[in-house]
Structures are given as structure tokens and as C-alpha cells.
Amino acid sequence: MAASVEHDSPESMQAPQTAVEVEETKTFKDLGVTDVLCEACDQLGWTKPTKIQIEAIPLALQGRDIIGLAETGSGKTGAFALPILNALLETPQRLFALVLTPTRELAFQISEQFEALGSSIGVQCAVIVGGIDSMSQSLALAKKPHIVIATPGRLIDHLENTKGFNLRALKYLVMDEADRILNMDFETEVDKILKVIPRDRKTFLFSATMTKKVQKLQRAALKNPVKCAVSSKYQTVEKLQQYYLFIPSKFKDTYLVYILNELAGNSFMIFCSTCNNTQRTALLLRNLGFTAIPLHGQMSQSKRLGSLNKFKAKARSILLATDVASRGLDIPHVDVVVNFDIPTHSKDYIHRVGRTARAGRSGKAITFVTQYDVELFQRIEHLIGKKLPVFPTQDDEVMMLTERVTEAQRS
């Protein structure tokens, strides 16, 4: 995350130096997290809290409702998981917290973090998402886990159909990536959920952007919340080198192969606009001998998780994905992000390129711009507030690949 952070509080304006020094020395213990959980953080390699954690955790421990504005990769799962586990230790009870998330992958990831942080205290989580057999989920809910992590649609399903399951005792509600939950039109589901959970609860709402829908949700769901904004401008990480390539659309495949050859030895995440194109490009690359795997919404859940795990385990070095995968997925070692199809929403660009240069590492992002994408590309430059350099290529070398690529396209 870039260091230019804007705080609203007047104190930070008067004495910026001291604020920075204090932040340098903050530990999880300073924030008020109990020893057991501090040890868990150590074991996870979380040496010092991130900015959003420093802002949110003390307030959450005081029992305030929180709106956290922070992009993915800023440590926000820890910012809500730690206070919840802390409170759970003080008053142990089942069905203690509910975390709502927009996508299945994100739900699994949050569950992993809860389980890792809470392993020494025996925290049980249930992930309730679509695409997975309802029966086994009902059984998991019958065991009354401490934490339920769910996508809104499937949760409503269980609230309506699973006997004996309710959230009347719920103490914490978290809405992660709230902007996205509402964008995917889960509004009615969220309203239904808000109706059946206790009014007397703590609510944390995390969102990368403050949209009108999120503001409406904030009014409906939160009591006198504190706002923790870690970064109010859209920004891409400083260690990220961003480039673009202006190419005729018929040569996109050829240039992609060229870049994969040029930067061989790196791991790549390639974003396409549709499931079909993801699948097609993956087959094309395989045909040319690359180890590429697709990840998109039309794959079954087990296939998606399989693809992700192969990529995470570095068994495959190229992951092709639709925007389903651009948000929230923490894949530690993406060296290069290629926007094979330029994103139609410029904000998605931020999320896509945010898959690389995470946690202080460097990374590259290369965006393909064809004759049809110029306007979209200008919007992206405008949004991030910088002009991107051209990625250097040897056009004659690219053209030498055309024949092999055309052949692979045919097959």
C-alpha cells in the first residue's frame, strides 16, 4: 500500500511526524489484542499491524460499529477477525459472528484466516456458499459453529429451509466488500438477513469504495459508526510497474505468447473479459506448451478451487481468469498481471493489477490496448492519475510467432 495516507482527524494534521513514529512501533498487543491472538498473529507471520488494522481494531474492541474503507490486500480480514475472536474469548458462544462476502472464493479465504487465527482456541467456522451441496452445509450449521461465512443467497436459503438454524443470538455482523455485495444485486437478500438478526449487535462494514448503495446500507445496518478510511484516492501500489501495449486486435494472441516467452520464469495472471475467452486462451496456450489453467464463473466450485490451488502451489505458472478472480483473492506470488482484455470498468483495473506487487513485493502489469479500447484506456489513466509507458517489444520477433499461434488458434 502506498504511504500517502489521508486521515480525517485534526490531530494527525498537526503532528505528522509523531503519528508516523507511533505507527512504526505499534504491535497487535498495543492495539489491545489478547496474548493468545497476538501469538497466533506471530505464527502467521503478521509482525506488525497494517494501517487499517491500527485504525479499526482499537475502535472495534471498544465495541463501536465500523465502516472500513480499504482496498484488497490491506489486511482488512485481520481488522475484523481479531476483534471478533477477542470478543469470542471473553464471552464464548456458538453462532457468534456472521461474515457476508460477495464471492465463494473470498468466503473460503476468510474462513482460512479465521481458522488460522483461532486454531489455538478451537474456533469453528462454516462456509455457506452456492455451488456446494446444501446437505453437508446444513450438518455443519447443526453443529453450531462460532463463525459463519456466507454469500447472501445461500445463507437465506438455509435460514428459510434448514430446521433449527437461526441467527437470533448473533453478536457480530461483518459485510466484506460491501460495494461488491450490493453490485451483484444481493440487496434484497441483505435486507432479509438484516431483518432476522438481532438489532443489538456490532456491525463492521468493509468496502473498497463508498457507493450510494453502501451509504444506504450503512444507514440501515450501523449504529453511530466510526469511519476508518485508509486511502481515499484510487491508487495502485508504488512498487507496481505498469505498462501498456497498443496492438491490432487480431494480433492479441501473438503478443500474449511473445510476452509469456519474454518474461518466462515469472508467474502470470491473465485477465479476459468472458468465460469463453478465458477458456479459449487457456486451450490456445496449452496447445503451445504453456502450463495455463483457467478460472471463471462457469466452472464448478471444486474445479475453481482446484485451479487456484494448483496455481498457488506453483504447479502452474499461468492463471487465466475473468473478473470473478480479480477481487479479494490472495495469491501471494503473481509476478505479472496481463490485462488481455481491457476492463470495461476502470475500477476493475485497480483490483486486477492489485493481484501483483502485494505485501511490499514488486510486480508488473501490462494492459493490451487495441484500436477499440483507446477510450477505456484513457479512462484508466485518468483514474490512477498517471500516464503509463509502453511495454518494449521487438515487433519483428512477435511476427515470427504468428504462424505457430495461428495454427494453435485453428486447432
Image (cartoon, grey):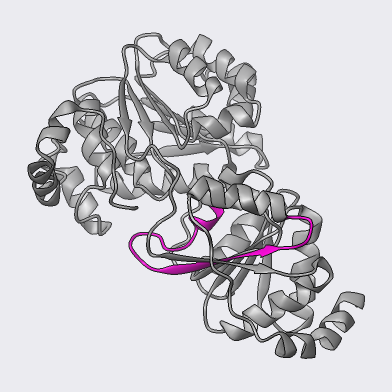
The magenta stretch spans which residues?
A: 351-373
Q: Which sits in the foreground, 287 or 405?
A: 405
Is any atom of residue 70 visible in this view? Answer: yes
Q: Say above or below: 365 vs 386.
A: below
> Does residue 337 appear to the left or right of 207 in the view shown?
right
> Does residue 304 appear to the left or right of 14 in the view shown?
right
Residue depicted at 68% across the width and 42% down the height: 131
> Does residue 277 appear to the left or right of 359 in the view shown?
right
Is any atom of residue 327 visible in this view? Answer: no
Percent position (x, y) of residue 95?
Answer: 40, 25
User: Is 364 contained in the magenta span?
Assistant: yes
User: Is 72 contained in the magenta span?
Assistant: no
Percent position (x, y) of residue 156?
Answer: 61, 22
Residue depicted at 57% across the width and 14% down the height: 191
Classify the position of the C terminus by image quarter: bottom right
Q: Which sits in the foreground, 334 or 368?
A: 368
